[in-house]
Amino acid sequence: MSENHSHSTHDAQADARNDNIKIWVNGDLVHKDEAKISVYDSGFMLGDGMWEGMRLYDGEWAFFDEHMDRMFNSLKTVSIDLGMTPADVRDILDKTAAANGMTSDAHVRLMITRGKKSKPFQHPGLSKWGPTVVAIMEHSKPAESLQGQGIRLATVPQVRGLPMSQDAKYNSHSKLNCVIACLQAEQAGADEALMLDPHGFVNTTNACNFFIVRRGEVWTSTGDYCMNGVTRQKVIDLCRANGIPVHEKNYSLYEAYGADEAFLSGTFGAQTPVAEIDGKSIGTGDRPVMMRIRALYKELVAADVAKQKATRP
């Protein structure tokens, strides 16, 4: 492994304003030091909940509708009745942003659990008081060092499982699978983990979706065993709309090691370069395809923000 300082795809530039942010907790906006939920909460006790990460650009939450589609679909699948509409969720986000003086370069982690339990046991029926809703919003710009150095990945034994065990399409609070993978990667001297699917094909990382570029073509996994990220889909759509060959397919580490470029996609960092996998440098360090996709993605975000502004009352 190289001697680069360890970092992650969620490294952000330091911002002292985050020391005094206000957090939305079940209808109240409270200082981060006072933000609390019950130890009986199903999210704390069991990881029983769903979450969404979104970024704020010029007063608008990029691709808000797509994030809400995923969130409400996930909540329905696990029978959590939020009792809100997407417009209600937007109101929570807007109020939290206003309380923190945020208009751009902010990121929110919106967390919804089944709620507080009457007893410290597993059965969902013990959550008797409705869901817990928390929005943690921070001033946040991805660290500039990520773009130059890139992320170092290590392939790990921990895999993303089959849908009948725990479907990786859930953006659930139950992230132990990914935490174990990240630990395995760090113990191997890397920054983050490259996870395979149950059949041994390249799948995703512990935190983001994964792409390679070979001979001008963009490859990513089938999507059957990974979080179907909003940014992942935007990258695929942009490639199709702009004449960049893109394939959702099974491929092995053989193709990944020999790639010309590799990068990650996610709401926080958009597109983050991968410098090496298992100690093997990826390509020459030039990333023309990723850079083109990044430019197209910035244009797409701007168009989405403008569309939202045009349709707001």
Image: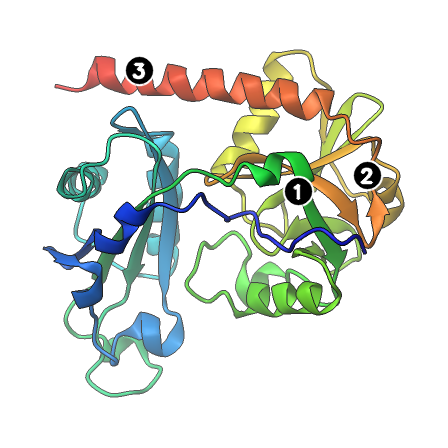
Residue 252 visible in the shown view: no
**Mark 1 sits on what residue?**
210
Residue 262: where, in percent of width, then height? 73, 36
Quadrant including the N terminus: bottom right
- In contact (CB < 8 Å): disc 2 and disc 1: no
Q: Nearer the viewer, mark 2 or mark 3?
A: 2
Kind of residue at badge 2: Ile
Picture disc at residue 282: 2
Mark 3 neighbour class, 10 Å CA radius: few under 14, some 14 to 19, many 20 or more:
few
Give whichever of 67, 268 is nearer the camera.
Answer: 268
**At numbered mark 1, what does the secondary structure look like: helix, strand or loop?**
strand
- The reply, left or right, for residue 255 in relation to residue 75 is right
Residue 12: where, in percent of width, then height? 46, 45
Quadrant including the C terminus: top left
Mark 2 neighbour class, 10 Å CA radius: few under 14, some 14 to 19, many 20 or more:
many
Residue at 35% over, 82% down:
122
Residue at 76% over, 58% down:
155
Give whichever of 73, 93 is nearer the camera.
Answer: 93
Kind of residue at badge 3: Lys
- In contact (CB < 8 Å): disc 1 and disc 3: no
In this picture the colour scheme is: rainbow
Picture disc at residue 153: none
**Mark 3 sits on what residue?**
307
Residue at 56% over, 18% down:
295
Kind of residue at badge 1: Phe
